[in-house]
Image (tube, rainbow, N blue to C red):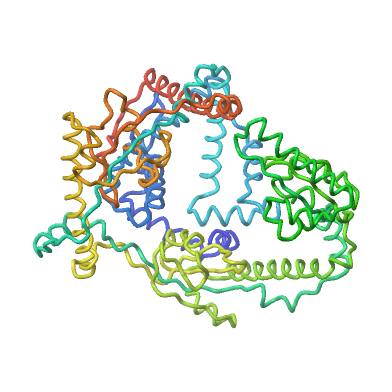
Amino acid sequence: MLLSLMRKHAKSWLIKFLITIIALVFVFYFGYSFTSREGVKVAYVNGELISGLEYERAYADFVERMRSQYKDFWNEGMVEALQLKTRALEFLIQQKLLAQEAERLGFSVTKEEAQKTIMSYPAFQVDGRFDLNRYRLLLNHNRMAPEDFEAALRQDLLQEKLKQFIFAFTEVSEKELLEHFRFDNEKVKIQYALFSPNENADVELNEKAIKEYFEQNRPRYKIPEKMKVSYLEFNPDDLKEQVTVNEADVVQYYENNAKLYTKPEEVRARHILFKVPEGASEAQEKAVADVAAKVHAQALDGVGFAELAATYSESETRSKGGELGFFSKETVPVDLAVVKDMIFGLKAGEISEPVRTPSGYQIVKVEERRAGGLQPLDEVREKIEEILVKKTASEMAKDQALSLMDRLPYETPLTEFAVENDLSAKESDFFDSKTGLPELGPDPKRDLSTLFALQKFETSEIVEIGGKYYLFQVVERQEPRLPDFGEVEDQVKADYRAEVLLDEAKKRAESFLKALRGGESWDVMVSKENVAVETPPAFTRRGSVIGLGHNQAFNDAAFRLTHENPYPQEVFTNERGAYVMRWEGTEPVDMELFEKDKSHLHDLVIEIKHRQAFEGWLDDLRKHAKIEIVSPVENR
């Protein structure tokens, strides 16, 4: 919106004044002008300069992305912990190497290729077509100039061309596929002893110890960033009375969506089920088939089908005379899906031969048939009109929201602007990214997370929640902070007590494990300690363990165990207590599943090899490149 305002009044004295102010802000913010920043030399890559301005842009982008990713957990100390300065420089070096190698190989990205890609981005489209206003609005919202976005896009497209060149000769052998399949699907069987914390034990809540615990774990109790917003709601329901649906629109929608109003052919049927036990012998199978044949003969002789179903069927429909109701081929009962073509080949009143299904033998009688086809327009007119009214009202509400957003002056309080436009803006209480705004629905945080990237008086894009449209403006922010002890005292005491009890359980488990590794019998120790033992189903390297959930360290330890070395070297803990495992064996992989999954597995392994090949290629480029660091980023 600001960009459009500037373009509209580009020659006015006010805009010239604003541009001057913006330039001065950049000068004082960075300590020197763009020109001087551009003149700072950070590094050379094969003689090509990385300027201070390039570096600052890349570094700022890294910081913003990490801040957005870590949200409430972000703090300035993470810049050093995540080595963002070094990563920003490494990124720029990589980009220079890629561009240089692309030029050497004769690869390039044309302006037309970049434009075509931009216009195909769904995020930049409205009703399936590229929308220039939306493109500019989204870039502005993400604080990105079009030229910067397009430069980054060209770099991505160039990188994709290089990747296609590198990956052209990548192959995967049968042996590699099997190794990956085994790694992902091999299962291990264990038992584990659970040492639960004794919740009835007395724990001395020493004030000094608790406060020391709080100081050591204070970041755990960090109060997240909060904000207060004002917002306008645009409800399509309020506009429905203004919508008029004409006959031409109804007919066009009906014709364009004929599939929605085409009913499939349906039958109403009854069935009689004769179950065959799982793993039945040939004799057992034949006995069930013989009974089904006798009942079938009775049905053909005129005995009532519903009566026979009530007497012989082993299905839940027995009490209803085997009634299944109407169904189509798409909604046929699961157990009858294998014989649906046979069922739909019967005429009304016809009875099938006994047929084998997954549950056993079944006899089916078709009672009634309903032909499918396109429903008459008059039957569905009311529903279509409701759809068109709802759709049009939604579009009107969104257009109202977009129009108002476009007219909202920069840094003008939304509440004041609403009054000027005969609207009523609401103001929220302080909320964080986890709680969201309950008054907007049961799970609003998914839609409101982007608000935390806005500054005071910044306005959001139009946000849709529950079919309504909203325009938000940040009124006030509260930075994340570490609390005082008194604010979280009860929680700290509860956590301290739980940790003391878990530590005691862990010590008992460690003593138990030490005895096992010293040669004591598992059964003897289990009986002696009177500890709970569980045998979860076998699990894969990345799978969850019943009772423990997913703990990769636990899984890795389990797969290192063998018959000769059945106990791990350490005890594992979670909120339930401390665990000691014992190896029970492994399960072989299913080779039939391997054959079925081979195609998907091939794609997965190819992707892994592509990534490894690209990383290796980059490493090789760097080894043979002349890279000179002029101004170490640690000093910047």
Residue at 28% across, 51% down: 76
* Residue 451 higher or lower than 475, as above or below: above
For residue 224, side relative to residue 392 (left or right)? left
Q: Is residue 449 above or below residue 405?
A: above
Q: Position of residue 520 (x, y in %)?
A: 18, 32
In this view, the residue in front, 505 or 483, is 505
Q: Quadrant of the C terminus?
A: top left
Asked if residue 566 lies left or right of residue 144, the reply is left
The quadrant of the rendering that contains the N terminus is bottom right
**Residue 157 position in % (x across, y down):** 57, 34
Is residue 495 left or right of 233 when viewed as pictured?
A: left
Residue for point 80% across, 48% down: 364
Residue drawn at x 55%, y 58% as measured from the top left: 3
* Camera-nearest residue between 517 and 4: 517
- Give percent across and percent down for residue 230: 47, 74
On screen, residue 279 above or below 506? above
Question: How many callouts does the rendering have?
Answer: 0
Q: Looking at the picture, how far across and down is residue 15, in whole percent?
A: 51, 63
Q: Nearer the viewer, residue 154 or 326?
A: 326
Quarter holding residue 550: top left
